[in-house]
Image (spheres, rainbow, N blue to C red):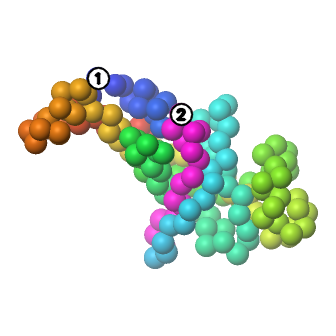
């Protein structure tokens, strides 16, 4: 078993997502593939994040959804369950607006196709593959890795 608490694993997930906020997003219950999206994170909002998209996007209708995340170094993986809803607060839409976002909309902030979705997080399953020194030694010598710190950390966390 891992020595890390679920809170430490959750914090590691947020840190990794902040470093590379690219995820795969899909609606659950739909027979559609997930698609890559850029998650807009806020260090003060630990139970939600946002996506700028267009009204014709496959996720635009919202509802139950899943986000899949892989950290840059492939040392943390997360599957996050939640609910997508349209963000209707103009202050939130403006807060995260940038030149990079504007580049996707012909009419800028006033583009009728602009849609911001809020992803309200329910829970996540997170895996860290940061093996202990013993685990790495066993892997490189072909010995059996017995789990726990030898294999990394895993937790189901409320987010």
Residue 119 appears left or right of 82? right
The residue that label 1 is drawn on is 3
Q: Position of residue 93 (x, y in %)?
A: 80, 50
Please tell me which residue is depicted at 72% across the width and 58% down the height of the picture: 52
Please tell me which residue is depicted at 65% across the width and 32% down the height of the picture: 43
Residue 15 appears left or right of 70? right
| Quadrant in the picture for the N terminus | top left
The residue that label 2 is drawn on is 15
Q: Position of residue 62 (x, y in %)?
A: 62, 64
37 relative to 47, above or below: below
33 relative to 36, above or below: below
Please tell me which residue is depicted at 61% across the width and 73% down the height of the picture: 58
Can you name the residue that lies furthest to the top here?
3
Q: Position of residue 2 (x, y in %)?
A: 26, 28
Can you name the residue that lies furthest to the front here?
141
As measured in the structure, the alpha-carbon distance from the residue carrying label 1 to the one carrying label 2 is: 19 Å
Judge by depth and name the residue closer to the eye, 108 or 46: 108
The range drawn in magenta is 15-30
Question: Do the CB atoms of the residues marked 1 and 2 lie less than 8 Å apart?
Answer: no
Name the secondary structure under disc 2.
helix
Q: Residues within 10 Å of mark 2 (few under 14, many from 20)?
A: some
Q: Position of residue 100 (x, y in %)?
A: 78, 54
Q: Is residue 25 magenta?
A: yes
Q: How many marks?
A: 2
């Amino acid at each position: 078993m891992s020595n890390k608490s679920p809170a430490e694993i959750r914090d590691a997930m947020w840190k990794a997502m902040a470093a590379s906020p690219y995820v795969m997003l899909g609606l659950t219950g739909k027979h559609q593939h997930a698609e890559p999206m850029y998650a807009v994170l806020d260090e003060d909002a630990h139970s939600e994040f946002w996506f700028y998209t267009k009204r014709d996007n496959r996720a635009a209708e919202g509802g139950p959804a899943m986000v899949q995340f892989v950290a840059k170094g492939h040392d943390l993986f997360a599957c996050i369950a939640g609910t997508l809803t349209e963000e209707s607060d103009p202050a939130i839409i403006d807060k995260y607006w940038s030149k990079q976002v504007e580049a996707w909309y012909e009419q800028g902030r006033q583009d009728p196709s602009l849609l911001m979705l809020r992803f309200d997080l329910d829970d996540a399953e997170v895996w860290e593959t940061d093996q202990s020194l013993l685990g790495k030694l066993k892997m490189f010598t072909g010995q059996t890795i017995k789990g726990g710190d030898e294999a990394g950390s895993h937790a189901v966390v409320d987010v």
